[in-house]
Image (spheres, rainbow, N blue to C red):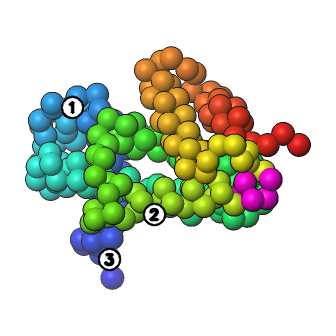
């Protein structure tokens, strides 16, 4: 029997395809209305309105989606497997799958995401997972011990975000961006 309507799962997956473009549109046009955002990504205002009724809802939906994206990037990186350098390489590549989300977070970050009493612990959990990764690498002699694991986490996110944003602004080339990020983080790796 043929289906005549789209299932809720299919609709949600369809809606998610707009998120990278919307993330970038909110960076490029921070004061844009829903109509202007819809136009910039090539959909009608009605389509965007069905997706999110207000700009505030859109931003909150993006925050939740980006948190899920970062959690998945950490999981897919298999940080406890292989050498720290190989895991770091996977971590960089997985975070680059949707660079628009990193750019969105750079411009819309809220410090309260890292407060212990914030309702969404995924930001703190992600930060803690990276701290553990760097600390574990230090204990195996793969990362320098004169830089704290917390500092390495901060270096990672700042180098990643800074270079992705620099690429968006045309300051660094798209080709080789992952290698440039990795090269920038080599100062944390012990020389064998």
- Look at 43% across and 41% down and name the residue there: 102
Residue 14 visible in the picture: no
Q: Position of residue 120 (x, y in %)?
A: 31, 64
Q: Main secondary structure of the magenta part?
A: helix
Q: Is residue 18 on the magenta stretch?
A: no
Q: Secondary structure at mark 3?
A: loop
Spatial distance from mark 1 to mark 2, Cα to Cα? 28 Å
Q: Nearer the viewer, mark 1 or mark 3?
A: 1
Q: Position of residue 142 (x, y in %)?
A: 78, 51
The reply to whether discs 1 and 3 touch (Cβ–Cβ < 8 Å) is no
Q: Residues within 10 Å of mark 3 (few under 14, many from 20)?
A: few
Q: Position of residue 5 (x, y in %)?
A: 24, 71
Spatial distance from mark 1 to mark 3, Cα to Cα? 43 Å
Q: Which residue is mark 1?
A: 30
The reply to whether discs 3 and 2 touch (Cβ–Cβ < 8 Å) is no
Above or below, 143 against 35 in this view is: below
Circle nearer the N terminus (3, 2) = 3
- Quarter of the rendering containing residue 68: bottom left
Q: Quadrant of the C terminus?
A: top right
Specify the label residue 189 is tagged with.
none
Specify the label residue 125 is tagged with.
2
Residue 179 in the figure: left or right of residue 12: right
Q: Which residue is mark 3?
A: 2
- Look at 72% across and 36% down and name the residue there: 186
Above or below, 35 against 59 in this view is: above
Q: Secondary structure at mark 2?
A: helix
Q: Look at the image and give the residue range highlighted in magenta.
A: 137-141
Q: Nearer the viewer, mark 3 or mark 2?
A: 2
């Amino acid at each position: 029997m043929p289906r005549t309507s789209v299932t809720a799962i299919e609709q949600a997956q369809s809606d998610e395809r707009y998120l990278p473009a919307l993330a970038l549109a909110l960076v490029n046009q921070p004061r844009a209305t829903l109509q202007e955002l819809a136009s910039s990504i090539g959909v009608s205002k009605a389509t965007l309105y069905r997706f999110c009724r207000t700009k505030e809802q859109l931003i909150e939906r993006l925050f939740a989606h980006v948190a899920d994206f970062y959690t998945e990037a950490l999981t897919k990186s298999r940080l406890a497997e292989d050498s720290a350098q190989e895991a770091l390489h996977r971590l960089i590549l997985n975070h680059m799958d949707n660079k628009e989300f990193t750019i969105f977070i750079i411009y819309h970050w809220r410090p309260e995401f890292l407060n212990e009493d914030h309702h969404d612990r995924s930001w703190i959990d992600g930060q803690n997972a990276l701290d553990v990764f760097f600390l574990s690498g230090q204990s195996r002699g793969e990362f320098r011990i004169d830089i704290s694991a917390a500092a390495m986490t901060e270096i990672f996110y700042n180098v990643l975000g800074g270079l992705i944003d620099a690429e968006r602004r045309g300051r660094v080339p798209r080709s080789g961006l992952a290698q440039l990020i990795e090269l920038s983080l080599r100062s944390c790796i012990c020389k064998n």
